[in-house]
Amino acid sequence: QLVESGGGLVQAGGSLRLSCAASGRTFSVYSMGWFRQAPGKEREFVGSIRWIRDSTYYPDSVKGRFTVSRDNSKNTMYLQMNELKPEDTAVYYCAATNSDGSRWSEWGQGTLVTVSS
């Protein structure tokens, strides 16, 4: 089970940190990641981290502004978002892959981030 928290309203240029608490079989997770979906748009990948190593991946749209990290002792993943823009407004979802990383197999319920101009 994945549970996100930390969403809210922030002004453009501000920062926000999202958390994703994972319970259950986290030892079988290959990677965890963050996605977002704005109204009327498709779900978009915004970053991921391999659960054993610390390799992180980002699309160009957030590279340099967003940082994914994790605390294995707490089974929690974070998304630090800096220099937020109105176009970052979306529902943010955390997700976990299956054990070989071939698909995103588990999703959280989402948390809303609204960036005002």
Image: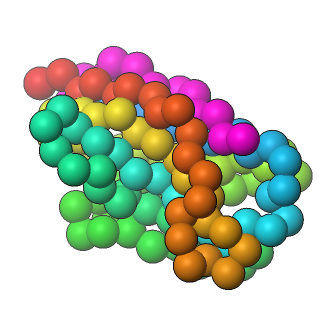
**Could you tell me which quadrant the C terminus lies in?**
top left
- Tell which residue pokes out farthest to the top in this image: 9
Please identify the quarter of the rendering in which residue 28 is found.
bottom right
Q: Residue at x 38, y 68 (%)?
A: 58
Q: Is residue 82 above or below residue 4?
A: below
Please identify the quarter of the rendering in which residue 63 is found.
bottom left
Q: What is the magenta range?
A: 1-12
Residue 85 shown left or right of residue 17 in the figure:
left
Residue 59 location in percent, x, y? Answer: 30, 68
Residue 93 location in percent, x, y? Answer: 46, 42
**Could you tell me which quadrant the N terminus lies in?**
top right
Q: Residue at x 67, y 69 (%)?
A: 98
Residue 42 location in percent, x, y? Answer: 22, 50
Residue 89 location in percent, x, y? Answer: 24, 33
Residue 39 shown left or right of residue 113 in the figure:
left
**Residue 62 lies within the magenta run:** no
Foreground of the two, 3 or 17? 3
